[in-house]
Amino acid sequence: MPGLGRQGGLVTYWVKIIYERDTYVIDLKQISAFCRAPNRKVTFWLPDGRIPILIHPQSNQDAYEKVVNYIKQIITTSEQGAYWIKILYDREEYAINLARVSAFSLEPNTGKISFWLPDSGTRMIIHPQSNPDAYSLVMEYIEKKTGYRLE
């Protein structure tokens, strides 16, 4: 089980991962986005470093299970200051903390919303017709958080 502890009043969720011969001890609560590919590979990016960590059940079963369980937990329970959503995008499933996204844009002719994942620089483009659920979640978040409507 990952280490649970307190850091400045916040509960932390530490996990030990061996990736490309290096050993990492990571507080998963500091990660702003996770990506699950159809082949079960999970990718996330270390804060402020744009360094991707990729784990797969065959190569790192224990760490993989801990990260997948953490993703399920954050999607189903809201925590103060976090706004996690699940988006199906480009055949992959993303769990994104929208509270960590610092800018959104709307393309007026198509209605597409764009934003960049913190720590990875990956641009997400959400179209209202091809991904209506994610589109409405992002639009709802923007209006709720900023008071602005992107229209």
Image: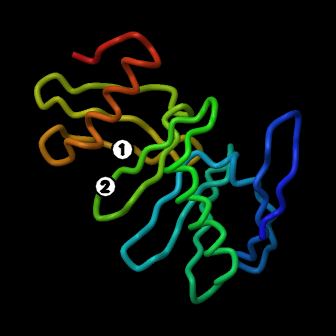
In the rendered image, residue 117, in percent from the top left (x then y), is placed at 49, 43
Q: Earlier in the sequence, mark 2 or mark 1?
A: 2
**In what element is the residue under mark 2?**
strand
Which quadrant of the figure has residue 81? top right
In the rendered image, residue 147, in percent from the top left (x then y), is placed at 40, 10
In the rendered image, residue 100, in percent from the top left (x then y), is placed at 56, 34
Q: Give 130 or 6, whichever is nearer the viewer.
A: 6
Q: Which mark is residue 115?
A: none
According to the picture, the residue beneath numbered tag 2 turns out to be: 89
Relative to residue 43, is residue 23 drawn left or right?
A: right
Which quadrant of the figure has residue 125? top left
According to the picture, the residue beneath numbered tag 1 turns out to be: 124
Relative to residue 146, is residue 11 drawn left or right?
A: right
Query: Is the residue marked by circle 2 packed among few (<14), some (14-19), or many (20+) residues within 10 Å?
Result: some
* Residue at image point 25% right, 43% down: 133
* Residue at image point 21% right, 46% down: 131
**In what element is the residue under mark 1?**
strand
Q: Is residue 111 above or below residue 46?
A: above
Which coloring applies here? rainbow
Q: Outermost residue, top direction? A: 147
Q: Quadrant of the N terminus?
A: bottom right
The answer to the question of whether label 2 and label 1 lie on touching residues, with beta carbons closer than 8 A, is yes
Q: Give 98 or 49, whichever is nearer the viewer.
A: 98
Residue type marked 2: Tyr
Relative to residue 89, is residue 119 drawn left or right?
A: right
**How far is disc 2 from disc 1 in space, using C-alphas?**
8 Å
Which quadrant of the figure has residue 70? bottom right
